[in-house]
Amino acid sequence: MKHLTILLSLLLLPFVSACSTEMVKRSAYELLHQKHCIDTTGSPNCDPAHKDYDRYRQDRDSLKRPEP
């Protein structure tokens, strides 16, 4: 039973770490945007056209891919 618990833990570790990494990146993106806004305007929402994290990732990924 002990070996089964260890095996299950090892199998689940990549899924848990991948989710937490993505959440950290998403939070950091928003926090950096808010910090920039506060530093420049004093308001945390200075740019109404600010891209959300998903749109930012799409744009970034499209720049990484070579065009055919």
Image (tube, rainbow, N blue to C red):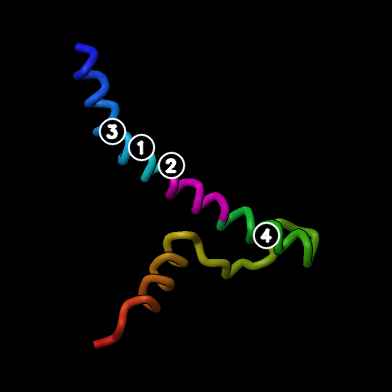
**Residue at x-position 54% and y-position 49%:** 27
Q: Secondary structure at mark 1?
A: helix
First of labels 4, 1 by sequence position: 1
Q: Which residues are magenta?
A: 21-28
**Residue at x-position 21% and y-position 18%:** 3
20 vs 43: above or below: above
Tell me the kind of residue under disc 3: Leu
Q: Circle 4 is placed at which residue position?
A: 45
**Residue at x-position 24% and y-position 13%:** 2
Quarter of the picture holding the C terminus: bottom left
- Return the residue nearer the eye: 47 or 60: 60
Quarter of the picture holding the N terminus: top left
Marks 2 and 1 sit apart, C-alpha to C-alpha, by 6 Å
Marks 2 and 4 sit apart, C-alpha to C-alpha, by 25 Å
Q: Circle 2 is placed at which residue position?
A: 20
Q: Circle 1 is placed at which residue position?
A: 16
Q: Secondary structure at mark 3?
A: helix
Q: Are marks 2 and 4 in contact (CB under 8 Å)?
A: no
Marks 3 and 1 sit apart, C-alpha to C-alpha, by 6 Å
Graded by Cα atoms within 10 Å as few (under 14), some (14 to 19) or many (20 or more), the crowding at tag 3 reads few
First of labels 2, 4 by sequence position: 2
